[in-house]
Image: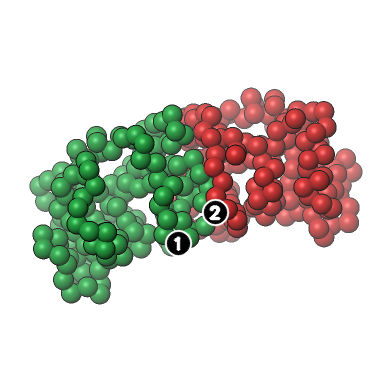
Chain colours: A green, B red
Amino acid sequence: MRKLILGVAVSLDGFIEGPNGEYDWCLTDQDYGLSDFFKRLDALFIGRKTYEMMLAMGDDPSPGFPRLKEYVFSTTLDKVKEGAILIRGDIKNEVEKIKNEKGKDIWLFGGASLTTSLMNLGLVDELSLAVHPILLGSGKPLFQNIRARINVNLIDTKKYSSGLVSLTYTVG
Amino acid sequence: MRKLILGVAVSLDGFIEGPNGEYDWCLTDQDYGLSDFFKRLDALFIGRKTYEMMLAMGDDPSPGFPRLKEYVFSTTLDKVKEGAILIRGDIKNEVEKIKNEKGKDIWLFGGASLTTSLMNLGLVDELSLAVHPILLGSGKPLFQNIRARINVNLIDTKKYSSGLVSLTYTVG
């Protein structure tokens, strides 16, 4: 079965964005294992807010960014851009169906609300956290409203000269 | 100068206690570098709540726990137990004075409120976080009300068979 991987940059105090949506603190001076990560993937899960932010930023993918089948999770949107797929029904069934399809692994990119829903439903298989050497103090927490304790299993750590630490866990 | 080291166990989602004060998730099956850590120390900084919790638990130190000079930070207490020192004045001056005294390093054990004050005053020199392989979902965050971004420098990582990762940073 395809794995659903939450892959995000996070500050040492657990924020994925600063208080005004800032992500200027995210290090981009090195590859940080992203090329290898991208090779595992052929699909992307994003929530509505992330989708709209990405639309606003324009459709040019970042250099080195893989071509991924885009699934947009929203209860309010009626349609999404050409090529993307809108998921607005029963998330659990829909995600299980997609995970059972043939394909490579799936990148759960965010945001916080979609991440929380999928974590609480037990649908996330792996966490890949790029822990940045900074305290933001405030902002949007990576995890919100997780309903019960979730045990995770460390499978890999990597540290980089910049002080970024990559932590990889399987879930459950 | 003596270093002030924040040394705590933290869940992967950044909590130092569960929603009801639980710390049953803290791993104690191995030494996790604590013996070496304790050798660096001869003093302990704690806030009032932590002090009262430790008093309530009785005065027997845990096995292997070093004898440390105890400084209790409180604006409300009038006195503390024999041997301990109450700090209730100008925190910045008092802490700088203690750090300039002869001695080994100082363990900032918590709680969250004292940690925040000392972080915001720029008095913490090192972070030593034992990141546990669990999401608690809710509880007491390690950092609260940090006022501005704080850059930290990674100096060490260690991973253990249990999945605990020890991350050590200098501050500033």
Residue positioned 25% across, 68% down in the render: A74
In the picture, the disc for residue A49 is none
The local crowd at label 2, few if under 14, some if 14 to 19, many if 20 or more residues have their Cα within 10 Å, is many
Q: CA distance from mark 2 to mark 1?
A: 12 Å
Residue positioned 75% across, 30% down in the render: B1
Q: Chain of mark 2?
A: A
If the image is split into quadrants, where does the C terminus of chain B sit? top right
Please tell me whether mark 2 sits on a helix, a strand or a loop: loop
Q: Is residue A6 visible?
A: yes
x, y percent for residue A59: 19, 57
Is label 2 or label 1 in front?
1
Please tell me if label 2 and label 1 are on a single chain: yes
- In depth, the one of B93 and B145 nearer the eye is B93
Please tell me whether mark 1 sits on a helix, a strand or a loop: loop
Residue positioned 69% across, 52% down in the render: B117
x, y percent for residue B64: 69, 29
For marks 2 and 1, the one nearer the N-term is 1
Q: Amino acid at mark 1?
A: Asn
x, y percent for residue A54: 26, 59
- In depth, the one of A131 and B136 nearer the eye is A131
x, y percent for residue A98: 15, 55
In the picture, the disc for residue A137 is 2
Q: Is residue B162 visible?
A: no
Where does label 1 land, which residue? Answer: A20
Q: Chain of mark 1?
A: A
Above or below, comparing residue A88 to residue B65 in the picture? below
